[in-house]
Image (cartoon, rainbow, N blue to C red):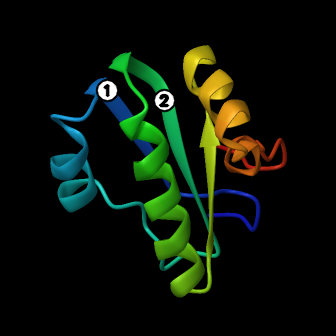
Amino acid sequence: MSAQEAPVLRLSGPVRIDTVTTLLQTSVPSFSQARSVVDFSEVTDIDSSALALMLQWRRDAESAGSQVHFMHVPDNIRVLAELYGVTFLLQEDSGVEV
């Protein structure tokens, strides 16, 4: 793995209030690396609970001394992030190779 490559967690299916707890427990990004990426490109349905999940992953990464980046975040989550003032979650790192 080169310095620019990062482990990728590819989410698929729904990311909703009824799936977020399971996702948090079973799909933890690899915070042992300096950077991790969560890819939303295969998510089929999403609600505002995804923002809570993203915030938790960000806290977990910071606690581990790493960073987490999000790719292909659906537009409705971008709108909600702006409304809630958490657009910093959505800053994508174009230097990350996946």
Q: Which of the 4 quarters of the picture holds residue 79?
A: top right
Q: Amino acid at mark 1?
A: Ser
Q: Residue at x 42, y 38 (%)?
A: 50
| Along the viewing direction, whichever of 34 and 84 lies nearer the viewer | 84
66 over 83 or under it: above or below: below
The percent coordinates of residue 33 (x first, y second) are: 56, 75
Q: Residue at x 51, y 36 (%)?
A: 39
Count of numbered tags: 2
Q: Residue at x 46, y 74 (%)?
A: 60
Query: Is the C terminus in the top left, top right, bottom left or bottom right quadrant?
Result: top right
Q: Kindly tell me whether residue 72 is visible in this rendering.
A: no
The percent coordinates of residue 61 (x first, y second) are: 53, 73
Binning the other alpha carbons within 10 Å of mark 2 as few (below 14), some (14 to 19) or many (20 upward) gives: some
Residue 97 is left or right of residue 6, and the answer is right
Query: Is the N terminus in the top left, top right, bottom left or bottom right quadrant?
Result: bottom right
Label 2 with label 1: CB-CB less than 8 Å: no
Give the secondary structure at mark 2. Answer: strand
Q: Kindly tell me whether residue 7 is visible in this rendering.
A: yes
Binning the other alpha carbons within 10 Å of mark 1 as few (below 14), some (14 to 19) or many (20 upward) gives: few
Q: Which of the 4 quarters of the picture holds residue 49?
A: top left
Residue under numbered circle 2: 40
Whole-number angstrom distance, CA of label 2 to CA of label 1: 7 Å
Q: Which mark is residue 70?
A: none
Residue under numbered circle 1: 12
50 over 33 or under it: above or below: above
Give the secondary structure at mark 1. Answer: strand
80 over 25 or under it: above or below: above
The percent coordinates of residue 37 (x first, y second) are: 57, 50
Q: Earlier in the sequence, mark 2 or mark 1?
A: 1
Q: Amino acid at mark 2?
A: Phe
Q: Which of the 4 quarters of the picture holds residue 65?
A: bottom right
The percent coordinates of residue 41 (x first, y second) are: 50, 22
